[in-house]
Amino acid sequence: MPYDPFTGAALEGSPAARFSLDAPSPSAQAGLEAPRFCTECGRRMVVRINPMGWVATCSRHGVITSE
């Protein structure tokens, strides 16, 4: 089941999806914001922001980078 990378809410196809009314922020929609939640498991990720981009790490699914 996929999860929203900015809110952690379950996406379409799950009973919890119909209760998710939050729209991503304008910066998230533009691709400027780092994801805070893993899209595979919905867990909160450790995110490091640096001048060249960002690195997000899920304890279960590994590393995602902005590159």
Image: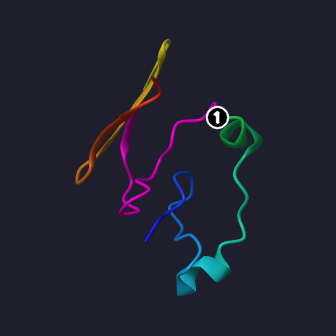
Where in the figure is residue 19, as x and y percent of width and height?
65, 80
The residue positioned 55% from the left and 80% from the top of the image is 13
Three-letter amino acid code at the position of disc 1: Gly
Assign the C terminus to one quadrant of the image: top left
- In the rendered view, tell whether residue 49 sits above or below residue 59: above
Q: Is residue 50 magenta?
A: no
The residue lying furthest to the right in this view is 26
Q: Which residue is mark 1?
A: 31
The residue positioned 56% from the left and 58% from the top of the image is 7
Horizontal side of residue 6 vs 43, given as left or right? right
The residue positioned 50% from the left and 12% from the top of the image is 51
- In the rendered view, tell whether residue 13 sits above or below residue 62: below
Q: Is residue 42 magenta?
A: yes
Horizontal side of residue 8 vs 60, given as left or right? right
Where in the figure is residue 22, as x and y percent of width and height?
71, 63
The residue lying furthest to the bottom in this view is 15
Horizontal side of residue 3 vs 19, given as left or right? left
Assign the N terminus to one quadrant of the image: bottom left
- Which of 66/6 is in front? 66
Where in the figure is residue 31, as x and y percent of width and height?
64, 34
- Tell me which segment is drawn in magenta: 32-48
- In the rendered view, tell whether residue 60 sits above or below residue 64: below
Q: Give the overall secondary structure of the magenta segment.
A: loop
The residue positioned 56% from the left and 70% from the top of the image is 11
